[in-house]
Amino acid sequence: MNDALKRPIRAQSLVDAVTERLEAAIVNGELAPGSRLSEQGLALSLGVSRGPLREAIRRLEGRKLVQRTTNIGVHVTQLTGNDLSDLLVVREALEGMACGLAASAMTDADLDDLDRLLGEHGDQESVRDGTGYYQQSPDFDFHFRIVSASRNERLIQMLCHDLYDLLRVYRYKSSRFSGRATAALDEHLRIAAALRARDPAAAEAAMRAHIRNARTHILAQIAADTTPV
């Protein structure tokens, strides 16, 4: 999976394609948090000119995946352990609420689609062998689907736009922690069962427990990455 920067861009909307490729490289860790983006190096790797590359970087900056510092350049956004912990506490509260609302708002068709989605997730080789649980797009993302189904526009804006992209980087890291992918899928299935039962309290509790578990694994992974060897 970590070869997003090694394949030349094929014709489509060039800026869109470059943005997607850089986003994938950031989420999967090929461009690590804190790393500096070299326009010259990236343009060569992707086989594009600097114009579309600069526009793609501006888009990612708007989504808070990269940060620009005057006289220094552009770096992949990096959160401290404390920043991330605080952010995940907020996410637990908001997404738990969204899940509770979704238990009442989701249609039978929504629930059927969610079951199909989890079936596709379970078929992923990386999930089956426990090496990762990568939900590569919003349409394929369990959390995005549930938040959208809450029908609460304020929550959707906060969770699917303001926080979504940045948290995906750390969700991916967490999913690669030993045993986490399988456990996360089991937790998703429990959330789906509570939604299917139309039980808002159980759905909120299941989602909050899931995000607390993810928070524990993410922070453990960050600690392991920064521990001297």
Image (cartoon, rainbow, N blue to C red):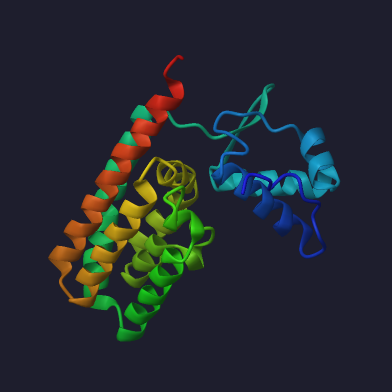
Q: Is residue 120 among what the camera can see? A: yes
2 is higher (above) or lower (below) than 201:
above
Q: How many marks?
A: 0
Residue lying at the far bottom in this picture: please name it.
108
Place residue 156 in its image quadrant. Answer: bottom left
Place residue 149 in its image quadrant. Answer: bottom left
Residue nearest the observer in this picture, 173 or 48: 173
Residue plotted at (36% across, 79% down): 110
Residue plotted at (37% across, 38% down): 218
Residue plotted at (39% across, 33% down): 221
Q: Position of residue 70 (x, y in %)?
A: 65, 25
Q: Position of residue 48 (x, y in %)?
A: 84, 48
Residue plotted at (53% across, 61% down): 137
Residue nearest the observer in this picture, 34 or 113: 113
Q: Position of residue 61 (x, y in %)?
A: 60, 43
83 is higher (above) or lower (below) than 5:
above
Residue nearest the observer in this picture, 177 or 159: 177
Drawn side of residue 205 relative to residue 127, left or right:
left
Drawn side of residue 65 relative to residue 17, left or right:
left
Q: Position of residue 64 (x, y in %)?
A: 53, 43
Q: Is residue 151 among what the camera can see? A: no
Residue lying at the far top in this picture: please name it.
228
117 is higher (above) or lower (below) than 71:
below
Drawn side of residue 78 relative to residue 42, left or right:
left
